[in-house]
Image (cartoon, rainbow, N blue to C red):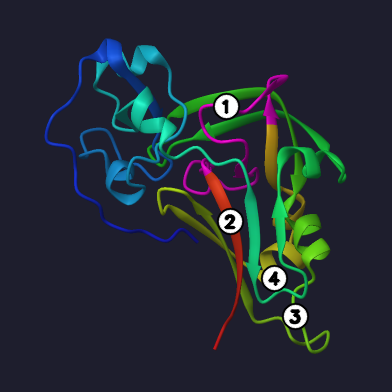
């Protein structure tokens, strides 16, 4: 599940030389008006500079390096219906069970491959939630949903069952490294879901919080 929100579109595009192209995780088919720019504010992801210079890819939205700096996040808060709220950093995540992921591709909603990680390192979201301990009254108390939120307001959503009673739980990671390097321009941490058919919509960079909510 991916929650949408509308934002104002830019009226002026800056020169290509000044622009970074970032992935549009929830973009539409070629010819659509940069849907992820609207859905994700300026949260678009990692496209190549070549895509930016061309200025034609439906899955990219231009953003300056200066604007990108406004959304950088250094901490990840785990809040909501948990017994132990957490404030995590790259250093604290490194002390957990860090896995190596190979050959992860960010696929736009249009089907375009927007980014390829030959290797990445991260921690399962499920492990993070188990550390925080969701407030369950018993084993049948399972009506929760989890929101991964970025600093620009973009959100990706998971059900409790997806993470704890489904193969998806083995595929949702908070990344701390990509291709052997720390994550820099997209904040310190990125959330991915490896087994989504289109991985872009639940590819959340500038990640700032994991929120656990009970379904009323």
Residue drawn at x 77%, y 45% is 123
- The foreground one among 90 and 56 is 90
Read off the residue under disc 2: 209
Magenta span: chief secondary structure: loop
Read off the residue under disc 3: 135
Q: Is residue 153 left or right of residue 165?
A: left
Q: Are marks 4 and 1 in contact (CB under 8 Å)?
A: no
Q: Residues within 10 Å of mark 3 (few under 14, many from 20)?
A: some
Read off the residue under disc 1: 184
Which is nearer the N-term, disc 2 or disc 4? 4
Read off the residue under disc 4: 161
Q: Quadrant of residue 17?
A: top left
Verify whether residue 205 appears in magenta. yes
Task: State the CA–CA distance, disc 3 to disc 1.
Answer: 33 Å
Give, as a single range, the part of the protein colored magenta. 177-206
Residue drawn at x 41%, y 42% is 109
Which is nearer the N-term, disc 3 or disc 4? 3
Residue drawn at x 82%, y 88% is 138
Q: Position of residue 110 (x, y in %)?
A: 37, 38
Residue drawn at x 26%, y 56% is 6
- The foreground one among 190 and 152 is 152
């Amino acid at each position: 599940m991916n929650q949408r929100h509308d934002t104002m579109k830019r009226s002026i595009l800056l020169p290509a030389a000044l622009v970074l192209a970032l992935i549009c995780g929830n973009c539409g088919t070629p010819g659509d008006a940069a849907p992820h720019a609207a859905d994700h504010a300026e949260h678009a992801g990692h496209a190549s500079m070549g895509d930016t210079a061309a200025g034609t890819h439906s899955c990219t939205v231009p953003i300056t390096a200066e604007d990108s700096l406004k959304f950088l996040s250094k901490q990840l808060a785990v809040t909501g219906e948990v017994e132990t709220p957490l404030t995590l950093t790259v250093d604290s995540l490194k002390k957990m069970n860090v896995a190596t992921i190979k050959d992860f591709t960010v696929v736009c909603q249009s089907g375009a491959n927007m980014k390829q990680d030959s290797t990445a390192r991260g921690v399962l979201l499920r492990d993070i939630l188990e550390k925080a301990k969701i407030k369950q009254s018993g084993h049948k108390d399972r009506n929760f949903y989890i929101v991964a939120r970025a600093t620009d307001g973009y959100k990706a959503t998971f059900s409790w069952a997806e993470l704890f009673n489904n193969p998806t739980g083995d595929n949702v990671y908070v990344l701390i490294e990509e291709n052997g390097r720390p994550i820099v321009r997209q904040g310190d941490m990125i959330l991915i879901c490896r087994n989504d058919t289109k991985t872009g919509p639940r590819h959340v960079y500038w990640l700032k919080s994991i929120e656990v909510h009970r379904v009323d």
